[in-house]
């Protein structure tokens, strides 16, 4: 064996394979170029062997078209230091050159000020044939045909056609969320779909129509926008709709993904996962895209800072916000008055009306009626209180427990409830959690249950559940009002720590619709 240098053309062909490894990679590179060209309307057609993308971006001159598919050609990097301040989706200057090597590539483009467009075809080295004039609206049309036609092994290794389409559609949905101001018209064989421009909430409703517009919670602050479906109403069996984006592109961010799962762990039922989207708008100086050819992985400076900011905004957005004026026009005037005296996300005032089946609290809300399950509402209150402060009280007489294993003794000691030997095969505990003070009959069972909890979080959940008001307990109106106020003041009032929904709402507009209050039949003094 001898050592030798690879031929330049072989190096270039391998580099092309890194940049363009699938039909989805073609879509990715062309769409990113269009968005960098300030396009607001994209018309994408995908076929088994190629792609056509038309946009209304700034377009290219004939001179630019001649150079567009040559190696390392870009308009986005001028100086070496620009690599550390990337502000565009594309910047490597390899996408079109790679496409020219792997497929038949044609580009037509027209600048807004030009009287006509120009079209160029490229050979396998990215060299342009002479430009030809063509009638064209301002923007660019890129046509890629016979992808991998000369690479049969690459074609054989591609996923099935339905799998490729699913991957492309998923990627388009992610990019559409990152750029809600862009109109998308997408054509697959036998299928056409549109995404219209609008707000992030409107775009989410288009992409995930099973979640109503009002069931998205939106949070926004400097450098960060997030949205999640209300956890008491929507969740999934897999964590496949947790989308994280940085500066216009969804990325793989395992550390933040794990933090989100942990945050929602006590808001959703076991084995269920949130619908979640977060978009970081970070200064280019803190982002390094040079980690993966597809730019799906990246390096972030001060990762812990941005992760903490995300979780903080999640907590802020979890509260039950007042109804929007568009949802409840009949209480628009009332909410305008409220907004003058309270911040926008101030929690609405609830008035306890009655207890139903000694289980549910019926409450009047400015925009309708709420039905609150008393046990799990109190469970949420106690859970958050125990999270912030786990207090114990000393007993005059100890609680006697049956035999405990060394692990059980160690756990109770960690929870501030140390057992002491008390005769043969028995243990005495002289402290109990304060929340159990009113239930002496349950002290022994509660302590044994806590000794089986493997960590403080599990112990907190179990203790909150055991200590909460039981269903079947009579409550007075003042007690109900106090519980409603405590529950509304929690950070995550929509679900209990086990993920069960706490409140059922009936909007005033639903009542009006049911009782046909919009009908005019004879004289009526009702409103």
Image (cartoon, helix red, strand yellow):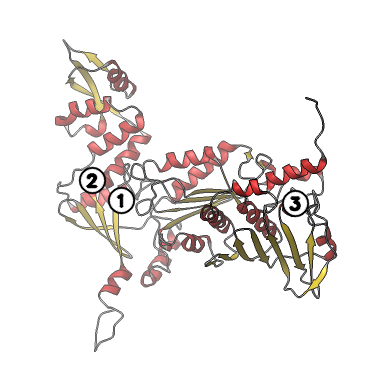
Q: Outermost residue toward the bottom?
A: 522
Residue assigned mark 2: 375
User: Is residue 43 something one can see in this rendering?
Assistant: yes
Residue 327: x and y in percent read: 40, 67
**Up/down of 46 relative to 457, above or below:** below
In the image, which is nearer the foreground, mark 3 or mark 2?
3
Q: Residue at x 53, y 39 (%)?
A: 254
Tell me the number on the disc at residue 236: none
Q: Residue at x 83, y 66 (%)?
A: 131
Measure the alpha-carbon separation of dots 3 and 2: 66 Å
Q: Which residue is label 1 attached to?
A: 501
Q: Earlier in the sequence, mark 2 or mark 1?
A: 2
For marks 3 and 1, the one nearer the N-term is: 3
In the rendered structure, find residue 101 and report the number of the disc placed on it: 3
Q: Residue at x 43, y 60 (%)?
A: 341
Q: Residues within 10 Å of mark 1 (few under 14, many from 20)?
A: many
Q: Quadrant of the N terminus?
A: top right
Residue nearer the viewer, 171 or 133: 133
Q: CA distance from mark 3 to mark 1?
A: 56 Å
The crowding category of the residue bearing disc 2, from other C-alpha atoms within 10 Å (few below 14, some 14 to 19, many at least 20), is many
- Quick one: label 3, few (<14), some, or many (20+) residues within 10 Å? many
Q: Quadrant of residue 195?
A: bottom right
Residue 54 vertical placement versus 501 (above, below): below
Helix, strand or loop status at disc 1:
loop
Asked whether 89 or 442 is in front, the reply is 89
Label 3: element kind: helix
């Amino acid at each position: 064996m001898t050592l030798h240098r690879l031929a330049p053309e072989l190096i270039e062909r391998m580099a092309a394979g890194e940049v363009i490894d699938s039909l989805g990679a073609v879509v990715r590179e062309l769409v990113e170029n269009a968005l960098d060209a300030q396009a607001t309307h994209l018309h994408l057609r995908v076929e088994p062997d190629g792609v056509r993308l038309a946009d209304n971006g700034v377009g290219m001159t004939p001179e630019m078209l001649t150079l567009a598919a040559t190696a390392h050609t870009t308009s986005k990097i001028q100086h070496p230091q620009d690599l550390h301040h990337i502000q565009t989706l594309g910047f490597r200057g390899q996408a079109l050159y790679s496409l020219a090597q792997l497929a038949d590539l044609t580009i037509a483009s027209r600048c807004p000020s030009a009287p006509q467009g120009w079209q160029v075809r490229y050979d396998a080295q990215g060299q342009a044939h002479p430009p030809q004039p063509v009638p064209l609206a301002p923007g660019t049309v890129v046509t890629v045909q016979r992808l991998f036609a000369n690479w049969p092994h690459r074609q054989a290794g591609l996923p099935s056609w339905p799998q490729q389409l699913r991957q492309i559609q998923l990627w388009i949905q992610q990019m559409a969320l990152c750029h809600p101001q862009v109109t998308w018209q997408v054509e697959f064989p036998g299928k056409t779909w549109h995404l219209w421009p609008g707000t992030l909430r409107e775009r989410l409703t288009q992409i995930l129509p099973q979640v109503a517009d009002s069931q998205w919670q939106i949070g926004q602050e400097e450098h960060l926008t997030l949205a999640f479906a209300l956890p008491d109403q929507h969740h999934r069996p897999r964590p496949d709709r947790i989308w994280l984006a940085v500066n216009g592109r969804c990325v793989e961010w395992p550390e933040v993904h794990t933090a989100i799962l942990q945050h929602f762990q006590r808001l959703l039922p076991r084995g269920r996962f949130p619908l979640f989207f977060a978009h970081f708008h970070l200064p280019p100086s803190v982002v390094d895209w040079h980690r993966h050819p597809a730019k799906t992985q990246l390096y972030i400076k001060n990762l812990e800072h941005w992760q903490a900011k995300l979780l903080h905004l999640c907590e802020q957005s979890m509260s039950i916000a007042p109804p929007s004026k568009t949802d409840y026009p009949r209480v628009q005037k009332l909410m305008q008055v409220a907004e003058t005296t309270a911040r926008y996300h101030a929690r609405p005032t609830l008035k306890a009306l009655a207890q139903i089946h000694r289980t549910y609290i019926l409450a009047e809300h400015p925009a309708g009626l709420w039905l609150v399950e008393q046990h799990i509402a109190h469970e949420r209150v106690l859970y958050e209180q125990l999270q912030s402060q786990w207090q114990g009280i000393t007993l005059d007489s100890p609680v006697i427990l049956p035999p405990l294993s060394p692990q059980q003794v160690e756990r109770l000691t960690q929870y501030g409830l140390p057992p002491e030997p008390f005769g043969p095969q028995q243990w005495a505990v002289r402290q109990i959690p304060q929340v159990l003070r009113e239930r002496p009959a349950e002290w022994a069972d509660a302590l044994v249950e806590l000794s089986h909890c493997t960590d403080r979080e599990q112990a907190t959940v179990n203790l909150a559940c055991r200590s909460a008001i039981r269903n079947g307990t009579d409550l007075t109106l003042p007690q109900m009002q106090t519980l409603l106020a405590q529950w509304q003041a929690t950070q995550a009032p929509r679900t209990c720590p086990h993920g069960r929904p706490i409140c059922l709402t009936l909007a005033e507009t639903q009542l009006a619709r049911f009782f046909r209050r919009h009908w005019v039949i004879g004289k009526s003094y009702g409103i």
